[in-house]
Image (cartoon, rainbow, N blue to C red):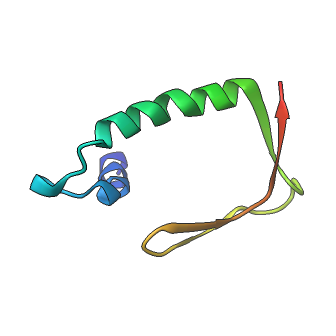
């Protein structure tokens, strides 16, 4: 299941001989950025009881509001 989801998420970088040459750099940057954001800031849905909705088209459309506070 996780492997299939991972393959689906990397579609934007292309496949085969036309794969984006910056794909690995992008993954590296994201894997460093996200933990730093979570470490330095607190995220909270605004208002907290709001459900996070995602509609999947060619790209994901998300509608949510959140409060960000520095730790």
Q: Is residue 41 above or below residue 16?
A: above
Q: Is residue 59 above or below residue 40?
A: below
Residue 15 screen position, x and y as percent: 18, 56
Residue 19 screen position, x and y as percent: 20, 52
Which residue sits at x=37%, y=47%? 2
Residue 61 screen position, x and y as percent: 58, 69
Furthest-right residue in this view: 47
Residue 44 screen position, x and y as percent: 81, 45
Q: Is residue 12 above or below residue 33?
A: below
Q: Is residue 1 above or below residue 64?
A: above
**65 sits to left or right of 10:** right
Image quarter of residue 16 = bottom left
Which residue sits at x=66%, y=31%? 37
Which residue sits at x=29%, y=53%? 7
Is 21 or 59 nearer to us in this picture?
21
Image quarter of residue 47 = bottom right
């Amino acid at each position: 299941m996780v492997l299939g989801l991972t393959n689906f998420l990397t579609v934007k970088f292309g496949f085969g001989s036309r794969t984006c040459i910056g794909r690995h750099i992008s993954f590296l940057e994201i894997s460093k950025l996200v933990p730093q954001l979570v470490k330095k800031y607190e995220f909270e849905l605004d208002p907290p009881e709001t459900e996070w909705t995602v509609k999947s088209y060619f790209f994901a459309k998300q509608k949510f509001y959140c409060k960000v506070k520095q730790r």
